[in-house]
Image (tube, grey):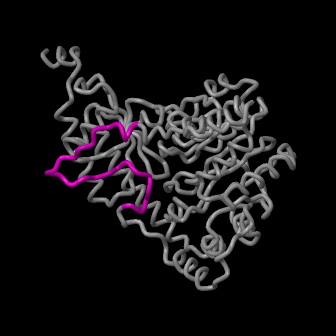
Amino acid sequence: MNPAKLKSQRQRWNVKPSEMSKKTLNPIRAIVDGMKLTPNPEKPMIALSIGDPTVFGNLPTDDTVLHAMKEAIDSHKYNGYAPSVGYQKSREAVANFYSCPEAPLEGKDVILTSGCSQAIELAISVLCNPGDNILVPRPGFSLYKTLAVSMGIQVKHYNLLPEKSWEIDLQHMESLIDDKTACMIVNNPSNPCGSVFSKEHQHKILSVASRNCIPILADEIYGDMVFPGCDFHPLAPLSIDVPILSCGGLAKRWLVPGWRMGWILIHDRNDIFGTGIREGLVKLSQRILGPCTVVQGALESILNETPPEFYQSTISFLKSNSEICYSELSTVPGLNPVMPSGAMYIMVGIEMEHFPDFQNDVEFTERLVTEQSVFCLPATAFEYPNFFRIVVTVPEEMMIEACIRIREFCARHYRPRSQDSHELDQ
């Protein structure tokens, strides 16, 4: 080409966003940003929409966690770069904390990440190529789809069953698998459902993965945040042959989501991942040079010295709020809450045929803000219309007040179906 012509072409500005950036869409943001959210000025706003347990200040982390951070800062040892996968001592601390005879872990089996969300991103990135597909729960955490689609990976949603406390529809899940399926994501305990899978159900999930030779990405960020009378079973110790990348972090159980400390636990059954997946994770982690070094410096103390009473207190509070919410809303005509067993959420079904003023859950929750200043997340954000999600981390009096307002709202808009009206007339 003529150099002069080339030069003239470059003198024209033509800066465009990348294809990856154009493909990146967070469904929650897309829906919420499009909602007309004008609270009732006569009622203070109660936001039950954000999965951040620190918002209202009623769930502080434990003093031992703060002390560990202060010690790490005062030591002056953690102001520089760490290895991209994390300090060896910190990786070993996580390995020791989660290791068990059925699924032993060493430091080399741990990759430290900037929050659980980066752990999920690295796990998807190392297992999948553009054109592959992954299996994702519906309803499910929207980030899975956000990350996958931006990377050119197709998302296939398998159904969860509300009538079975949100167990996986295993037959539906297996029907989605094809030769392009690179992994399945299993989220337990669940966001947005608050469900906790039994050991028996997880064995059945592993059987599907084993039959089809599909590795599992286990999102276990809410691990051990389960209510009394219910047990959390991590997936890896139950697996005989299915390799698992288990993602977790400090955010929820230790109530410090802003500290951005997550991890991947590599459970390589029968050396199926081999060196390739491990090396791939190391290379991918080098893109941002690892998570915050100060938190890494405090990690061993946080894991080993946080008193059990702290965890128990948090869980007791979450269970109490969940029971209040379930009890209040299960007697509201037109609503069908599903009692959770853990995490920080409760899903509530809307019998839309009884609320003709609204076309869908988005309009329902939008008007709930307008009239009652209560903001719940429409479950369309989780690919599951005609439900809404409530976060149960708010102070108890706020939870009760929110339920009273939701009841008032439903009483105002509830309409019996024509056959119900006919029966009432008789």
- Left or right: 183 with respect to 40? right
User: x and y percent of residue 274 in the render?
Assistant: 86, 47
User: x and y percent of residue 228 in the render?
Assistant: 50, 56
From the viewer's side, name the closer residue of 306 and 47: 47
**Which residue is located at x 70 percent, y 33 percent?**
130
**Which residue is located at x 66 percent, y 39 percent?**
7
Q: Does residue 424 show up magenta in the picture?
A: no
User: x and y percent of residue 409 in the render?
Assistant: 20, 38
Q: Quadrant of the N terminus?
A: top right
Quadrant of residue 105 within the rendered picture: bottom right
Residue 380 in the image: above or below residue 61: above
- Left or right: 268 with respect to 323? right
**Which residue is located at x 61 percent, y 31 percent?**
155
Quadrant of residue 109 within the rendered picture: bottom right
Please provide the residue range marked out in magenta.
31-55
Q: Does residue 41 show up magenta in the picture?
A: yes
From the viewer's side, name the closer residue of 227 and 91: 91
Residue 100 in the image: above or below residue 2: below
Residue 47 in the image: above or below residue 355: below
- Left or right: 107 with respect to 17? right
- Left or right: 118 with respect to 32? right
Q: Quadrant of the C terminus?
A: top left
Residue 163 in the image: above or below residue 230: above
Instruction: Please name the predominant secondary structure of the magenta segment in the image.
Output: loop
Quadrant of residue 393 within the rendered picture: bottom left
**Which residue is located at x 53 percent, y 45 percent?**
190
Q: How many marks?
A: 0
User: x and y percent of residue 267 in the render?
Assistant: 77, 51
